[in-house]
Amino acid sequence: MSAPPLLSVEQVAVQIGGLVAIADLSFTVAEGEVVSLIGPNGAGKTTAFNVITGYMRPRDGRVRFRGQDLVGQAPERIAAAGLVRSFQRTSIFGRCTVFENARMALHLRGRTGLLGALLRLPAARREEARLQEEAWAMLDFVGLAARADTPAESLAYGEQRRLGIALAAAAAPQLLLLDEPAAGLNPSETAECMALIRRLRDRGTTILLVEHDMAMVMRISDRIVVLNQGRVIAAGPPAEIREDPDVIRAYLGGAPGWESAHAAA
Ligand SMILES: Nc1ncnc2c1ncn2[C@@H]1O[C@H](COP(=O)(O)OP(=O)(O)OP(=O)(O)O)[C@@H](O)[C@H]1O
């Protein structure tokens, strides 16, 4: 028997005001996969992320993470359970240094608490040393260790995006949701972002991605789920999706960069 999926979205429907944002969405993500959710503008991708991470309640349907239904749970609880999201606009503290940002992102994992830290108890000191070491390791992992003392707002755009991913990954999530990580990046920054996603996957993080850069989606995904007007119109590996007539039709005259999906073949 195969293992149950890590994430299972089951017949989700979302209404916003009078508008059906998602009509019927079902898909799964297995442990260790990189799955991309794609579709033309307004297809319902961001809404799907909002539902999965608890920011929006669906009218119908279930979202199971490790078999447990997440619907109705608060975003913080969902994050604490191991399902973490990076935002399109990253949650970086611009005035703080890159290192300080990394260190702060690890605060949830501290155990001795604020009082211990203030009193500089030995256990708290040891823990602080450990967290600092982890922050360095994380910056090394995303290729930003050399920029540790730089105020985050002074980073190049691509570096800021990588720091944003690093901050989301700091909680060591089992499932990381990335919302358009390549938006606004130049080709070399996109390549670095893609390499980072692969390294995260290799480290054991399962990844669900919303992304408009088709070349990147085709290269990095194990599977692709295509949404159009709030419904799944296709799901499968990149080679199938690229040739799917319904997908091509949905994108015709629409999404930017569809040609690049073929360029990536
Ligand atoms: N807060 C909102 N108020 C009203 N309508 C909304 C809201 N959020 C989403 N919608 C509508 O729901 C539908 C799905 O939108 P959603 O943002 O999820 O699509 P998307 O696939 O993420 O699009 P994009 O690629 O442009 O980001 C659209 O018709 C959109 O206009």
Image (tube, rainbow, N blue to C red):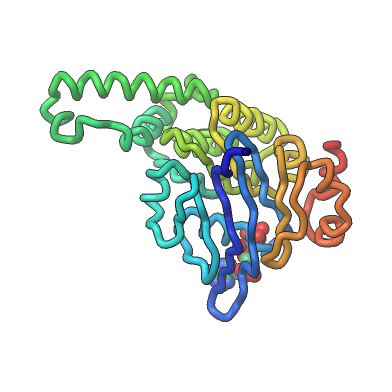
Q: Is residue 80 left or right of residue 56?
A: left
Give the residue at x 54% y 25%.
Answer: 203
Q: Position of residue 211 (x, y in %)?
A: 67, 47
- The mark total stands at 0
- Name above or below for residue 61 compared with residue 255: below
Q: In which quadrant of the rendered view does residue 42 lie?
A: bottom right
Q: Position of residue 219 (x, y in %)?
A: 75, 35
Q: Which residue is the extreme one toward the front?
A: 1
Give the residue at x 58% y 68%.
Answer: 13
- Name above or below for residue 136 compared with residue 8: above
Q: Position of residue 154 (x, y in %)?
A: 48, 35
Residue 154 in sight:
no
Q: Is residue 80 left or right of residue 18?
A: left
Nearer-the-camera pick, 237 or 118: 237
Quarter of the image that includes the C terminus: top right
- Name above or below for residue 250 compared with residue 219: below
